[in-house]
Image: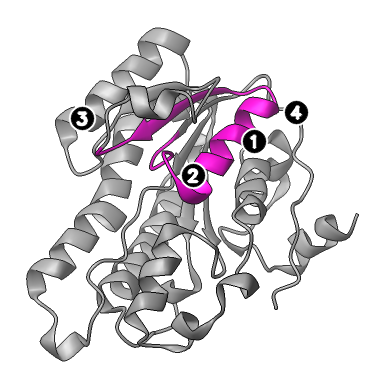
Amino acid sequence: MFDLSEIPVPDLKDKTILVTGGGQGIGAYLVALLVKHGANVFVGVYGVPIAEYEALLEGATVLMLDVTSEKSVNAAISQVKETAGKLDVLVNNAGIISEIGPVATLDSAALSAAFDVNVAGLHRMTTAALPLLKASKGTIVNAGTGAATTPMEGWAAYCCSKAGAHMLTRMFEMELADTGVQSFFIGIPPTDTDMQAKIRAAGLNPISKISQTDLVDPKVPASVMAWLCSTDARNLDETFLDVRDEFFKTMMAD
């Protein structure tokens, strides 16, 4: 349906990278790719004991990280600094779609929960990491979605919070322009993850009707995000990107 495949990932052996929400789905595939290509990877996980993740995320340093907690975020950044001494790339991958339901009957607290992870969580992580990112003239990669710019029935919490994440990315790009820190918001198409299973179960919009067999393999967006962590991405002028962009499709065809 989408006709997308993985893109080549350059060598990353000089990069120290922190990935939030890396315990499952696209994040876990991304961590594996980053490790495979030589990066020094720190991965934030939440909700399950670290020991249960360490085998899955072999080669990465696993951190217990709650992006809604300033204390947790600061502890994670401190560990990266103490262990690696630098940070080249921050990947804000943690995100939630809850709650799914009609906007007129949606509990306002559900909006707050989505904004706390998808917007405030992104802000907490980025501002905490900025001293290290400024020192390395590093990169911020924010996991995005077309829902940031397109309303989808039942997704008020997700669409609105991801729209906020999109604008926050643009704000960082504008206000950090003179520091050498680069920011990306990468749109991710419907992908075969646990989040997509929740979407299918809700059955509220056209995305929920897509057959699981037609969903994008999570290795595809993971490869694009890994490429954005590389030095090659420094040549890009755009902040708002999508896995389906012709630029990436050309690499898929190589």
Q: Answer left or right for 182 relative to 69.
A: right
In the rendered view, would you say 225 is above or below 14?
A: below
Residue 204 is situated, as x and y percent measured from the top left of the image, at 35, 87
Q: What amino acid is at disc 2?
A: Gly
Which residue is found at the position 67% from the left and 36% from the top? 230
Q: State which tag comes first along the sequence, 3 or 2.
A: 2
Which residue is found at the position 27% from the left and 79% from the top? 156
In the rendered view, would you say 253 is above or below 219?
A: below
Which residue is found at the position 53% from the left and 27% from the top? 88
> Which residue is label 3 attached to?
72
Residue 172 is situated, as x and y percent measured from the top left of the image, at 41, 50
Q: Which residues are magenta?
A: 19-47
Is the N terminus in the top left, top right, bottom left or bottom right quadrant?
bottom right
Q: Answer left or right for 192 relative to 24.
A: right
- Say which element carries label 4: loop
Q: State which tag comes first along the sequence, 4 or 1.
A: 4
> Which residue is label 4 attached to?
11
> Which residue is label 1 attached to?
33
Crowding around mark 1 (Cα neighbors within 10 Å: few <14, some 14 to 19, many 20+) is many
- Say which element carries label 2: helix
Contact check, label 2 and label 1, Cβ < 8 Å: no
Crowding around mark 3 (Cα neighbors within 10 Å: few <14, some 14 to 19, many 20+) is some
In the rendered view, would you say 9 is above or below 110?
A: above
Q: What amino acid is at disc 3?
A: Ser
> Which residue is label 2 attached to?
27
Contact check, label 3 and label 2, Cβ < 8 Å: no
Residue 167 is situated, as x and y percent measured from the top left of the image, at 38, 64
Q: Locate residue 74: give its quadrant.
A: top left
Q: What amino acid is at disc 4?
A: Asp
Q: Which marked residue is nearer to the observer: mark 4 or mark 2? A: 2
Residue 131 is situated, as x and y percent measured from the top left of the image, at 37, 26
| Frontmost residue, 85 versus 172 | 85
